[in-house]
Amino acid sequence: MAPSSSAPLPASPAGRRLAGTLSLRPGVASLIPGLPDDVAAVILCLLTFPDQSRLRATSRAWRLLLSAATLLPLRRSLRLPRRHLLCLFPTDPSLASPILLDPAAPTAWWSLPPIPCSPQLYGLANFAAVAVGGHIYVLGGSGFDARSYPLDHPSPSAAAYRLDLALSRQRWERLPDMRVPRGSFACAPAPSGGGVIVAGGGSRHPTLPSYGTRTSGVEWYDTAARAWRAAAAMPRVRAGCVGFVAHGTGDGREDEFWVMGGYDGYTTVGGVVPSDVYCRDAVALGLWNGKWREIGDMWEGWERERLGPVAAISAEDGRVTEVFMLDGHDIFRYNFSLNRWSKEATLRRKIPSTQSCGFVAMNGELYVLTSGKVPVETSNPWRQSKKRLTLEFQVYNPVAKTWRVLTTHPPVNVPIDFRTAALCRVELLRYLTRHLIANLDVNGDSIQ
């Protein structure tokens, strides 16, 4: 791919080698007839991720350019902004495949391979889905064995799966089991090594949440050794919590793994109906000293009953800098120094209390997701009106203090219950650029 004087040039030697890869491959035709290859490459580079995946089969030249080993370093050399993708698990991952969405094109969905779960288990719930670079991890959960009795007592799972989005032939890889089976737990990408760190959890019934076990155990996945390593346990048991790695919040500006909210026990209402006892505090694990520090209550008892859905905005290095919570119709921002939540904004469209919603941060914005079916207009007045599943995004920009609303139609048939569904954001560019530039064979032998 010969550069022209009017097109942007790669900023680094590695980028220049990547830009020349097409011309080094014998027998590779031009990308788009009538256009210089560098201009055509920029056009293809700006396409959404689902479109790029579909167009790889157009020609040999497009397959080479749209491969992860060439495309992602080229995006960085052109100084294009990083892009988060949304990975949605609509329901039980043993029953339905996860789907991927590029927010830049909210009408284009991309199905991922199904997870090879055991057919002897059903009702896998309370699992964790987290993306680390170009890998998506699915961890733990609460499974129900159809042959067991009684059925109201779930069994926690220690299973771990990983999907590499950089591979042209994607498939889930079974990882070693976690040391402690758990569901409904805190999980976050480890700050180094490309692994994950998990804390708390246990087993939890989707409709009888007070049944099950709880743990204070903490462990992290060592990708180099392909093994789970134990870390210092939390000060007390906690499940139903959320976790993230915060940058410079500890003593000496130490990075910490935070665990917020959740429940540590349950009581009974009137001596009959079980009810969870929710935590108003948080704990943080120093990633250098390996010690936990306890953080006091984040709100007063009269302010709210429990922690709502949490979304964290990260900096370029992937570490969290801002944390937000969805509480009813309002979004709150967490103040690390005051250990308090302050109101940030109110939703453009109120969500009924009977309807569940998702909450995730992508590309520096906060996405509030709701699902439902809407009537589809038909030209035939005698034909019965059909309903189509709709997914609505209320998107808030905390810097500009502005809202926008997007609507899309996901490739699923039933409304999504975000109490059991899982969301995670995927950032391909930063991880793959670092690893693929170092290992790319400019002669093309290693490009998949």
Image (cartoon, grey):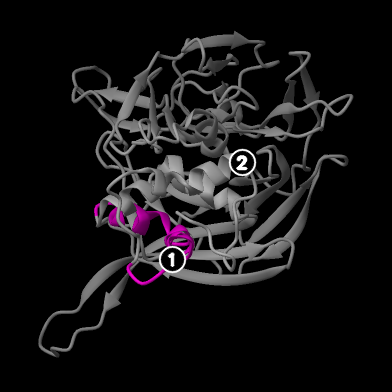
Return the residue nearer the eye: 360 or 343: 360
Question: Does residue 320 lie above or below 61 as drawn?
Answer: above
User: Please, what secondary structure does the residue beneath circle 2 have?
Assistant: helix
Q: Characterize the local packing of mark 2: few (<14), some (14-19) or many (20 or more) Cα atoms within 10 angstroms.
A: few
Residue plotted at (59% across, 22% down): 193
Q: Give left or right: position of 386 versus 42.
A: left
The answer to if 54 sits in the magenta stretch is yes
Q: Nearer the viewer, residue 50 or 227?
A: 50
Residue 153 seen anywhere in this rendered image of the structure: no
Q: Quadrant of the C terminus?
A: top left
Q: Position of residue 84 (x, y in %)?
A: 53, 50
Residue wearing tag 1: 36
The residue pinned by badge 2 equals 13
Quadrant of the rendering where the N terminus is positioned:
bottom left
Disc with the residue nearer the chain's start (1 vs 2): 2
Any part of residue 441 in sight: yes
Above or below: residue 228 compared with residue 137:
above
Helix, strand or loop at label 1? It is loop
Badge 1: how crowded within 10 Å, few (<14), some, or many (20+)?
A: some
Tell me if residue 383 comes above or below residue 312 in the rendering: below
